Amino acid sequence: MYDSKTYWNNRPNPNKGTKPENIDARHIPPFLVGARSVVEFGPGVGRMYQFYKGLNVTGIDFAKQYEDAATQSAIAAGVSMYTHRIHDVHEKPTPYKDNQFEKGLLIKVLLHAPHFEAVRILKEVGRIAEEVLVITYGGTQDGLAQHCFVHDYEELLEDVGATVHEFKTEGNQVVFKYSIK
Ligand SMILES: C[S@@+](CC[C@H](N)C(=O)[O-])C[C@H]1O[C@@H](n2cnc3c(N)ncnc32)[C@H](O)[C@@H]1O
C-alpha cells in the first residue's frame, strides 16, 4: 500500500521543475502583501521561498532529506528568520498555537495526499494560520501516478468546516483561500 511518508523520504527531487510556475508567481505575492509571518506546509527544497524575502518563515515537512536544501533556499531568498520543522501531522498536531501565523501556504501538496491525509493537513494548517492559500492539481485521475490523488476540494473544505474566501479553477489547477475559526 502507498505510504506517502516513505515515498517522500526516498524521492530525490520533490518537484520536476526547479522554479515556481506562472500560477505560483501570480497568486503567492499578492497573498503575502502586508504579512510578516508565514508557514509553508510541504515546502520540499523551498522552491517557493523566493517569494518570502523579509518574512519570518516556518517550513514544515515530513521528509528529512530536504531540510538542508530548504534552509539554503531560505538564506538565498533573504527571509528574515527561518525555522525548519520535520513533522508528521499523523503522529501529533504541530506545536504551534491557533492562528500563530498570519499566512499559510499549501503549494502542490494535497495532490500527493490520500483523502484522510488531505483532511488532516487542511485542518492543521487552517488551525495554525489565519488564512491559507492552496494551489494544487484539480484535474482528473486519468494517467496519474500512484503518488497522486484527485480530491473534491469543495467537499473537503466543507468537511473540515472551512470558510472559503476564493475558489478558482485555472486549467487543471485549483487555487483557493480558506480559514478555519
Ligand atoms: C511536490 S512537493 C511540493 C514542494 C513545494 N511546495 C513546491 O511546490 O515546490 C510536496 C512536498 O510535500 C511534502 N508532504 C507531502 N505530504 C506531507 C505531509 N503529510 N506532511 C508533511 N509534508 C508533506 C513532501 O515531503 C514534499 O516535500
Image (cartoon, rainbow, N blue to C red):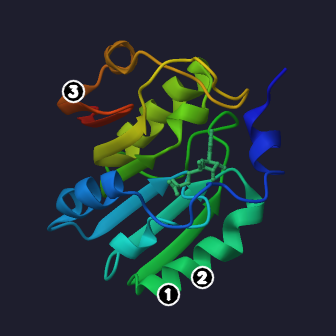
Alpha-carbon span between mark 3 and mark 1? 35 Å
The residue closer to the viewer here, 95 or 149, is: 149
Residue drawn at point x = 41 percent, y = 15 percent: 152
Mark 3 crowd level (few <14, some 14–19, many ≥20, 10 Å Cα)? some
- Mark 2: amino acid: Gln
Is 151 positioned to the left or the right of 70 in the image?
left
Residue 20: x percent and y percent? Answer: 43, 62
Give 138 or 98, whichever is nearer the viewer.
138
Q: Amino acid at mark 3?
A: Thr
Quarter of the picture holding the N terminus: top right
**Which quadrant is the C terminus positioned in?**
top left
User: Disc 3, disc 1: CB below 8 Å?
Assistant: no
Q: Secondary structure at mark 1?
A: helix
Find the distance from the CA under tag 1 to the CA under tag 2: 6 Å
Q: Is residue 73 above or below residue 125?
A: below
Q: How far across and down, in percent of the image, does residue 167 sit?
A: 22, 30
Disc 1 marks which residue?
76
Residue 177: assigned label: none
Which residue has dot 3 on it?
Answer: 163
Residue 85, compared with residue 142, is above or below; it is below
- How many angstroms separate mark 2 from mark 3 (CA)? 35 Å
Report the disc number at residue 72.
Answer: 2
Q: Can residue 100 be seen here?
A: no
User: Percent x, y for residue 99?
Assistant: 31, 49
Q: State whether residue 86 appears in this view.
A: yes
Comparing labels 2 and 3, the label whose residue is closer to the camera? 2
